[in-house]
Image: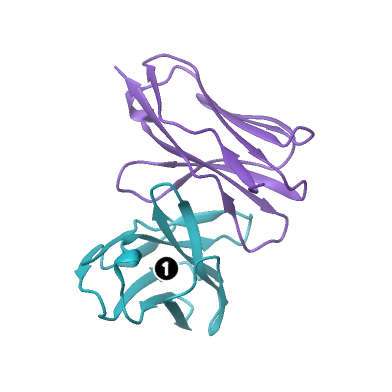
């Protein structure tokens, strides 16, 4: 079983849609959860960072962590064409030097 | 962008030639990382450094070596490039305040 599984894409939605991106993981030692956004031909940029179970909101973005189910989600409300990118989840254990990444899902928001 | 630059940004080389990629940071971070990103494989860790002259292997280190003689610079060397090393290479730093990493803009390497 892979440490992190990310829903395969690609995903195409109309502008204004609510988008849900998901990852599952197998190691209960993971404590920190991140979402990165990567535009075409750019480096990944940190979008959301969470520590505990529950929700964290930042504008149109909400990161959700369910440690009991080992499931993390990123919700995008009122999606915009500028949200078109690849989204990667990343997890780490506390104090670890390394991140474990999902393979990423490519999102296209159509005007 | 966490003050990370990579050079060169693009390189085309031939099989068997040595190649060195440079990562430079301006904020004195202790940890630096080299990843490669390929379709279907996502981001894979090649090597990382936890201080000057302190480095360790990642999951895909074969064919790569690294050096860090100064805090600000982390070099990735392909001793004898192969076509399987055609990829996009990203450098990253780890912040002191959280277990997160910030990435550079990437180097697109093509080995013919």
For this orientation, the residue located farthest to the right is A68
A21 or B28, which is in the foreground?
A21
Q: What residue appears at the point 33 percent right and 73 percent down from the top-left corner?
A: B21
Determine which quarter of the picture holds residue A82: top left
Disc 1 is placed on an element classified as strand
Residue B91, quarter of the rendered image:
bottom left
Residue B29 in view of the camera: no
Give the x, y percent position of residue B53: 53, 85
B35 above or below A32?
A: below
Q: Position of residue B74 (x, y in %)?
A: 43, 75
Q: Specify the chain shown as cyan.
A: B
Task: Output the chain of dot 1.
Answer: B
Residue A101 spot, x, y in % from top left: 55, 49
Q: Quadrant of the N terminus of chain B?
A: bottom left
- Can residue B34 be seen here? yes
Left/right of residue A98 with respect to residue B43 in the rendered view: right
Instruction: Report whether A78 appears left or right of B31.
Output: left
Left or right of A105 on screen, residue A54: right
The quadrant of the image that shows the C terminus of chain B is bottom left
Q: Is residue A75 above or below residue B7?
A: above
Residue on which disc 1 sits: B25
User: Where residue A76 sits: x, y (%)?
Assistant: 50, 24
Q: Which chain is purple?
A: A
């Amino acid at each position: 079983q892979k440490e992190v599984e990310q829903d395969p894409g690609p995903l195409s939605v109309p502008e204004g849609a609510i988008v849900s991106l998901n990852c599952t993981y197998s190691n209960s030692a993971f404590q920190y959860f991140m979402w990165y956004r990567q535009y075409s031909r750019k480096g990944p940029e940190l979008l959301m960072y969470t520590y505990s179970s529950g929700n964290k909101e930042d504008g149109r973005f909400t990161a959700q962590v369910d440690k009991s189910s080992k499931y993390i989600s990123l919700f995008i409300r009122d999606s915009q064409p500028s949200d078109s990118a690849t989204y990667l989840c990343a997890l780490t254990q506390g104090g670890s030097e390394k991140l474990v990444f999902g393979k990423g899902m490519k999102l296209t928001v159509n005007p | 962008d966490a003050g990370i630059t990579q050079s060169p940004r693009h390189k085309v080389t031939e099989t068997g030639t040595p190649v060195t990629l440079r990562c430079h940071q301006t904020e004195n971070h202790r940890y630096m990382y080299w990843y490669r990103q390929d379709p279907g494989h996502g981001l894979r860790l090649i090597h990382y450094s936890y201080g000057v002259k302190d480095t360790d292997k990642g999951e895909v280190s074969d064919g790569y070596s690294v050096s860090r003689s100064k805090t600000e610079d982390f070099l990735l060397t392909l001793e004898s490039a192969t076509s399987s090393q055609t990829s996009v290479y990203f450098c990253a730093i780890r912040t002191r305040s959280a277990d997160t990493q910030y990435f550079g803009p990437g180097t697109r390497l093509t080995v013919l």
